[in-house]
Amino acid sequence: MAKITFDGIEVEVEDGTTILQAARKIGGDVVPPAMCFYTPLKGSGGKCRVCLVKVTQGSARDPRPMPKLVASCITPVQDGMVVENTTNEEVLNARKGIVEMLLINHPLDCPVCDQAGECDLQNLSYEHGVSATRYEEPRRTFDKVDLGPYIQLHMTRCILCYRCVYTADQITEKRVHGVLGRGDAAEIGTYIENVIDNDFSGNVIDVCPVGALTDKTWRFKNRVWFTKPMNAHRDCPTCSGKVTLWGRGDTVLRVTARKDEYAEVEEFICNTCRFDKKEMSDWTIEGPRHIDRGSVISANHYELPVVNVPIVPNLPKSTVKKMPTE
Amino acid sequence: MGIKILTEHINVPGIETLEVYRKHGGYRSVEKAIKTMTPEEVVEEVKTSGLRGRGGAGFPAGMKWSFLAKPEGVPRYLVCNADESEPGTFKDRVFMEKNPHALIEGMITSSYALGANTSYIYIRGELLFVLRILEKAIAEAYAAGLLGKNILGSGYDLDLHVAPGGGAYICGEETALLESLEGKRGNPRNKPPFPAVKGLFQSPTVVNNVETIASVPWIVNNSGAEYAKIGIGRSTGTKLISASGNINRPGVYEIDLGVPVEEFIYSDEYCGGIWKGKQLKAVVPGGSSVPILPADLILKTAAGEQRLMTYESLSDGGFVSGSMLGSGAFIVFDEDQCIVRNTWNYARFYHHESCGQCSPCREGTGWMERVLHRIEHGHGHQQDIDLLVSVAKQIEGNTICPLGDAAAWPVASAIRHFREEFEWHIKHPQEATAPGAVYRGQLAAATV
């Protein structure tokens, strides 16, 4: 076991745990954001750099600070490590800089993007972004590409987190897409114009932190914050069949895997559950799905639009409204 | 003239053949090491020599070797980084092209020291003709029993392979090189684990530059203590310098570390002075990624001491008034060179070569290039200078591999030392974009 101090809070974790996971054990506002790291995917992380933290004391044995900011998602803890995240100006400035980098080539088309409302990049830029851009040049653009009948790739929005690449590598038998090109011309592609065709291909939509990979059966049907999330299950021969249904009235608009507060799926689901079972009668409804993530969905129909009254415990900050005082 | 360790026989006709190479004392170190020394003793000699990595970072080679993990039953690898692609660097190419056996001898001796039975030379894709020279030399060495099973009857086996890259600068970064060598996309890996623990094919691996490995035979033949006598302080031995730019005698020079920079530029033995007797404006002393220094700071440190060609002296003053020896690509600019144009050129290179894996480098290199392009072509705004400084700072230190730093340093240093020139470009776009126009104000001020 290793004991570390994260933003002044002590936490004890297993050896080999990463700093990010240790911070998630504490939870709340101190947890560094993560755009590319995804717990269920081995080898992910280290790419987007938004989870950078300052290690002011390497370990109890060697108390020297680490010279550079480190990516908390891939750096293992050492006993006696002291880490600063939200308490360190340098970290916050670096994060601000990186969010700016992520946004310079992002189209910021949230008003027409299906991911809006549950988008990691949107949340990140609300919290760490700047209100104006310093980037004057044209943004890079790509044409939309259909990756088979169910998935559309809108590369313009992609932040190259590589999650979908790892997903295809690790949970499907054959990966047909990958990263082509280099630098800011790098793109996700199926060389050449291939179709992603296997039972678990739909999971790339769930792992995508932005709206680059979208579900074609759901595109433009509704805004996520108008839909009701429900836990449901069915007897599925290929996957666990445990999903979240997003519906309006009696219509099921989309099916996703169940995601935790860091948008990480509990269990990957198969394409049949995701794309084909769009009737209420296909599913056994378990009840409303509580969404923990800091996004607009949190303030949905199951939680009252509370005005600073803690009826629901641990309500995310984004739901707290500022009302004029009398 | 100092001692020549690497280039002594480089111009001997036929040195690329095994016969001539052996006539000039070639492969003595292999015999000496394999027959009379234990691997640990060889590592110890290299440690004593103080030999530092010649690829750019200058990390002590002996120390790197001693970090190599040695778990039972797991193969170890030595990989020679011949992916020399930094703008301004061409020493390894000349060396391998002329004297391939010297590298092979170094590879055998070093592999023996590290206990590697399979070693690789990862060569830059553009140097296919050098690859053929190396392959020919390796075939000769196999035929002579210097490679393969049971080398010189000692029971030590070594297979040496040459693998070409696809011509990506990023594959000169050691972990990207290993990925590429494994047949994957050349993306740098997250560290830790370091290659010394998990490198090529998840096995302990040492990656060394061509020049580092080629220095090992001399150290084995003449002892590490002898090697340590050459040079000054912690910068021991000799170094190949690729001198280019506006000088009378561009080329590859082997110098004893510690030669004064002034002597290196103006002595007829080396660069032979500035071309056409013009005035020195600036120098990039270690390849495009290190900070550029103006004439006054390259000849003397900020404290007024003479600057020497050593790792320490060139980095004296940190990045405020110093630079780095890097890979030894000495690029000289005379008074007619435009710093803005040059900085844009470098930024364009790094934009093109960024692997696109981590966000600050992927987006930032392109951003810097576009802003510099704007300034160079007369469309800059006054706030662009601070924007560049800020973007460079956002990249520096926040990336997976050093390419981000390498992209940020030249831009930041050019603005630090030549801010006036950038301002002039922005204020006088018409004059600045005229053909051959160069800002000379700062130069005049420096000479007064």
Image: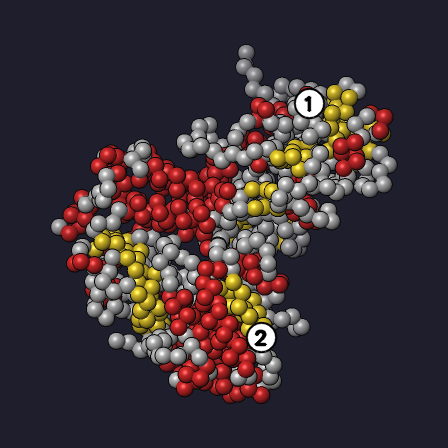
Residue A276 drawn above or below residue B230: above
Secondary element under disc 2, as helix, strand or loop, is strand
Q: Nearer the viewer, residue B332 or B37?
A: B332
Q: Which disc, if any, is residue B159?
A: 2
Q: Which disc, if any, is residue A221?
A: 1
What is the crowding at mark 2: few (fewer than 14 residues within 10 Å), some, or many (at least 20)? some
Q: Position of residue A112 (x, y in %)?
A: 59, 24
Residue B281 drawn above or below residue B5: above
Residue B220 drawn above or below residue B65: below
Taking the view exactly as shown, the residue that stands out farthest to the left is B448
Taking the view exactly as shown, the residue that stands out farthest to the top is A326
On the image, which quarter does residue B86 sit in? Answer: bottom left
| Residue mark closest to the camera, 1 vs 2 | 2
Q: Nearer the viewer, residue A143 or B112?
A: A143
Look at the image and tell me whether residue B219 can be seen.
no
Look at the image and tell me whether residue B425 can be seen.
yes
Say left or right for B233 vs A34: left
Secondary element under disc 1, as helix, strand or loop, is loop
Which amino acid type is shown beneath numbered disc 2? Asp
Q: Residue at x 41, y 31 (%)?
A: A136
What is the crowding at mark 1: few (fewer than 14 residues within 10 Å), some, or many (at least 20)? few
Q: Position of residue A211 (x, y in %)?
A: 61, 32
Q: Position of residue B173 (x, y in %)?
A: 49, 58
Q: Are marks 1 and 2 in contact (CB under 8 Å)?
A: no
Residue B104 drawn above or below residue A174: below
Q: Residue at x 41, y 75 (%)?
A: B99
On the image, which quarter does residue B186 sit in? Answer: bottom right
Q: Position of residue A215 (x, y in %)?
A: 69, 32
Q: Residue at x 30, y 44 (%)?
A: B340
Which amino acid type is shown beneath numbered disc 1? Lys
**Chain of the residue under the numbered disc 2 shown in the image:** B
**Chain of the residue under the numbered disc 1 shown in the image:** A
